[in-house]
């Protein structure tokens, strides 16, 4: 066992008894590759990944792939519903941390207050919180959303016409979000995942 823990079976990253558990928040604007990174990182580490789009729609009694082409901030995307959705994600994360070495939260987390609540939840659960803010060019985000719109298995309702409204509502990450990785996701998925995994490993080694 080294300072980074050990792998037990394919993709399973086990935190040793002297290491703190971890909550990894993958956030950012729509189309920046959050869900892909969270899913692939979860598979690589063997950690559960909670996707806000799936949690939101499940709370509304919908299948995660049900399309809801609503205006920004309306219906299940209202401020009140979103607050409830993030609260449910924190609840589920606390449950996972009782048996898992880490958990990944995938969501826009555009308001600083929601990121602060994750930090508080992590502290209460005896875990460390770190943040990965996904970024890419508008052109790349548009291309991704266009492909997603044609994918019947996609769970996100992000659309080009909502981009400006979400960007205007976004609280940029600040010092309070440290440890923080500002991560450009325009590269191939394996490279994006490898860089995020390296960031997590270094934080684990530092504890």
Image: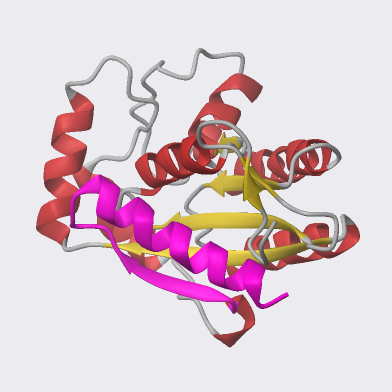
Q: Nearer the viewer, residue 123 or 168?
A: 123
Q: Nearer the viewer, residue 124 or 21?
A: 21
The total number of labels drawn is: 0
Image coordinates for residue 27, horizontal then vertical, percent? 47, 57
Q: Is residue 179 magenta?
A: yes
Residue at x 63%, y 62% (from the top left corner): 4
Q: Is residue 22 magenta?
A: no
Image check: 71 left or right of 205?
left
x and y, in percent, of residue 74 in the image: 48, 39
Q: In the displayed image of the protein, which residue is found farthest to the front?
A: 1
Res 113 seen here: no
Question: What colouring does the structure picture have?
Answer: secondary structure
Q: Residue at x 63, y 82 (%)?
A: 176
- Report whether residue 55 is seen: yes
Depth check, front residue: 124 or 194: 194
Quadrant containing the N terminus in the rendered view: bottom right
The span picked out in magenta is 178-207
Image height of 199 relative to 158, above or below: below
Quadrant for the C terminus, please: bottom right
Residue 165: percent from left, percent from top? 33, 58
- Name the residue: 71% across, 59% down: 118
Q: Position of residue 167 (x, y in %)?
A: 34, 64
Q: Quadrant of residue 166?
A: bottom left
Q: Quadrant of residue 39?
A: top left
Q: Is residue 160 above or below residue 153?
A: below
Residue found 87% across the figure and 60% down from its top = 126
Of residues 18 and 89, the one drawn nearer to the viewer in this rendering: 18
């Amino acid at each position: 066992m080294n300072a980074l823990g050990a792998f037990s079976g394919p993709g399973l990253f086990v935190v040793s008894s002297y290491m703190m558990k971890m909550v990894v928040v993958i956030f950012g604007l729509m189309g920046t590759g959050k869900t892909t990174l969270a899913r692939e990182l979860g598979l690589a580490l063997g950690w559960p990944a909670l996707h806000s789009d799936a949690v939101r729609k499940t709370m509304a009694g919908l299948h995660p792939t049900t399309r809801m082409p609503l205006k920004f901030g309306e219906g299940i995307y209202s401020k009140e519903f979103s607050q409830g959705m993030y609260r449910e994600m924190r609840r589920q994360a606390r449950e996972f941390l009782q048996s898992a070495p880490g958990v990944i939260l995938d969501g826009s987390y555009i308001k600083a207050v929601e990121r602060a609540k994750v930090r508080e939840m992590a502290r209460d659960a005896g875990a460390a919180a770190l943040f990965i803010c996904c970024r890419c060019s508008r052109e790349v985000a548009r291309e991704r959303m266009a492909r997603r719109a044609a994918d019947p298995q996609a769970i996100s309702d992000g659309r080009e016409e909502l981009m400006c409204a979400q960007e205007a509502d976004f609280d940029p990450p600040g010092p309070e979000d440290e440890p923080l990785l500002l991560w450009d996701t325009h590269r191939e998925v394996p490279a994006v995942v490898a860089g995020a995994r390296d960031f997590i490993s270094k934080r684990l080694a530092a504890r």
